[in-house]
């Protein structure tokens, strides 16, 4: 092995010497160096190489040397990326992210091939169609998993300490959820924003209107759950923030190009500008989801509950190229309304709480009115403020809900402090 390596080094030295002054010139001319390396690969590599693949590989390597989010998407990868934006694609119905040195299944969509064959969150993806994933970018892995409906996808997975297993799935049309909303209790909505796909803002607005119409007293509060939300279209995050803001900065961007230094502002006239709001985040809340959390927090519109967010605070622009490929290039950094850089910092919650679920097998605690012969009380509507919260086993959601109820409870008191009914309302900003 040592002799072989030595021969290789000598051979390269001989070639450089035979080229005379070319070697010195190449060191000062990276383009000439690239052409020389390309020529050596074409002439001397052990197998035939497709020149187009070489060029694609060179461009991909150059772009990925910039940062983790800039990428070159060949035509096939770019089509998969466009499917991501629309939320509809042909695939197996599970989402993979690179976490802790492994490609981890983080979501399995309902009624998908993945759900039917028992793939679960936490499984580690090892291979796709017999090919190990080491060294591949997420865009390449996504491209390999996507395909025409009816075609077969083979994946190799490991679950915790179990032996790896191979699963064969038939791809079907998968529609990734964007927004889902439900009543936590009448008047209080729990809104899960899974992705910021195209039309996410209008979908959220429509779902809130539906819940508002179904509630006897209308909506009185909403919890926006963006845990595990990896981001998506920045304009949709801005649009959702604008639904809850009457004025103020939503997000600002700063980049090298003059056109990348910009500021998005909220406009008045939205239906939900005064609806009490809380936002639930975790360590995998990223990008556009961080824009939303930062905008509502810094404008004093929402309490943020959960764990410090991921800290992906950069903007990527897509440049479509002539051959159907695309360049995704980082062009700016994102800043919250208070001027805090999201990149590397994330959003720090007002109230920190993990994702733990409270055990459900414990009996409820005794209260005074449970005791035999206890005296009856007067109207206890106010003291029962948190009764419904006791049934919420998601600790972060429970805390967010309690904050909304406390805010509602404070409002009559605040109005009383301002004087007669209506006095002071004209002075509110």
Image: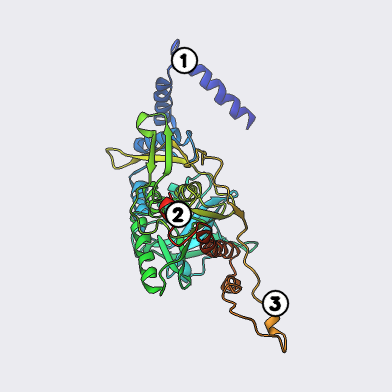
Q: Quadrant of residue 122?
A: bottom right
State if disc 3 and disc 2 touch (CB < 8 Å): no
The image shows a total of numbered marks equal to: 3
Query: Whole-percent x and y of residue 401?
Result: 54, 64
Q: In front: 112, or 37?
A: 112
Q: Earlier in the sequence, mark 3 or mark 1?
A: 1
* Label 2 environment density (alpha carbons within 10 Å; few <14, some 14–19, many ≥20): few
Q: Is residue 368 left or right of residue 264?
A: right
Q: In front: 259, or 400?
A: 400
Q: Quadrant of residue 26?
A: top left
Looking at the rendering, in which quadrant would you find the N terminus?
top right
Element class at badge 2: loop
Whether residue 165 is situated above or below residue 262 in the rendered picture: below
Q: In front: 138, or 360?
A: 360
Query: Whole-percent x and y of residue 146?
Result: 39, 56
Q: Please give the residue where the numbered disc 2 appears in the rendered image.
A: 424
Q: Please give the residue where the numbered disc 1 appears in the rendered image.
A: 23
Q: Earlier in the sequence, mark 2 or mark 3?
A: 3
Query: Whole-percent x and y of residue 347?
Result: 54, 47
In the image, which is nearer the foreground, mark 2 or mark 3? 2
Residue extending furthest front? Answer: 420
């Amino acid at each position: 092995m040592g002799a072989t390596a030595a021969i290789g080094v000598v051979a390269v030295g001989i070639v450089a010497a035979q080229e005379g002054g070319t070697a010195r010139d190449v060191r000062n001319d990276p383009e000439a160096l690239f052409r020389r390396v390309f020529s050596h690969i074409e002439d001397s590599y052990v197998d035939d190489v497709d020149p187009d693949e070489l060029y694609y590989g060179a461009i991909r390597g150059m772009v990925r040397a910039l940062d983790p989010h800039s990428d070159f998407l060949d035509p096939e990868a770019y089509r998969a990326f466009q499917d991501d934006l629309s939320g509809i694609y042909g695939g197996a119905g599970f989402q993979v992210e690179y976490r802790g040195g492994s490609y981890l299944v983080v979501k399995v969509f309902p009624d998908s091939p993945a759900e039917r064959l028992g793939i679960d969150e936490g499984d580690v993806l090892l291979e796709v169609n017999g090919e190990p994933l080491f060294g591949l970018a997420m865009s390449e892995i996504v491209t390999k998993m996507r395909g025409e409906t009816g075609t077969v996808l083979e994946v190799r997975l490991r679950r915790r300490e179990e032996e790896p297993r191979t699963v064969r799935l038939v791809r079907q049309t998968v529609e990734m959820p964007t927004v889902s909303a439900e009543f936590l209790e009448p008047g209080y909505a729990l809104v899960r924003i899974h992705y910021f796909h195209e039309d996410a803002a209008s979908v959220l607005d429509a779902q809130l209107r539906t819940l508002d119409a179904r509630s006897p007293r209308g909506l009185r509060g909403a919890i926006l759950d963006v845990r595990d939300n990896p981001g998506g279209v920045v304009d949709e995050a801005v649009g959702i923030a604008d639904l809850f803001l009457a004025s103020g900065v939503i997000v600002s961007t700063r980049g090298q190009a003059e056109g990348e230094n910009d500021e998005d502002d909220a406009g008045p006239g939205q239906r939900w500008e005064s609806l009490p709001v809380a936002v639930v985040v975790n360590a995998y809340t990223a990008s556009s989801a961080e824009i939303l959390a930062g905008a509502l927090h810094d404008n004093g519109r929402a309490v943020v509950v959960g764990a410090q967010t991921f800290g992906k605070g950069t903007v990527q622009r897509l440049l479509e190229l002539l051959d159907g490929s695309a360049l995704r290039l980082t062009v700016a950094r994102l800043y919250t309304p208070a001027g805090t850089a999201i990149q590397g910092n994330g959003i720090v919650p007002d109230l920190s709480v993990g994702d733990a679920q409270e055990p459900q097998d414990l009996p409820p605690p005794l209260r005074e009115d449970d005791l035999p012969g206890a005296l009856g009380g007067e109207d206890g509507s106010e003291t029962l403020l948190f009764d419904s919260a006791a049934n919420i086993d998601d600790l972060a959601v429970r805390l967010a809900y309690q904050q909304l109820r406390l805010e509602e409870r404070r409002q009559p008191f605040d109005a009383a402090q301002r004087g007669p009914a209506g006095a002071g309302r004209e002075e509110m900003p």
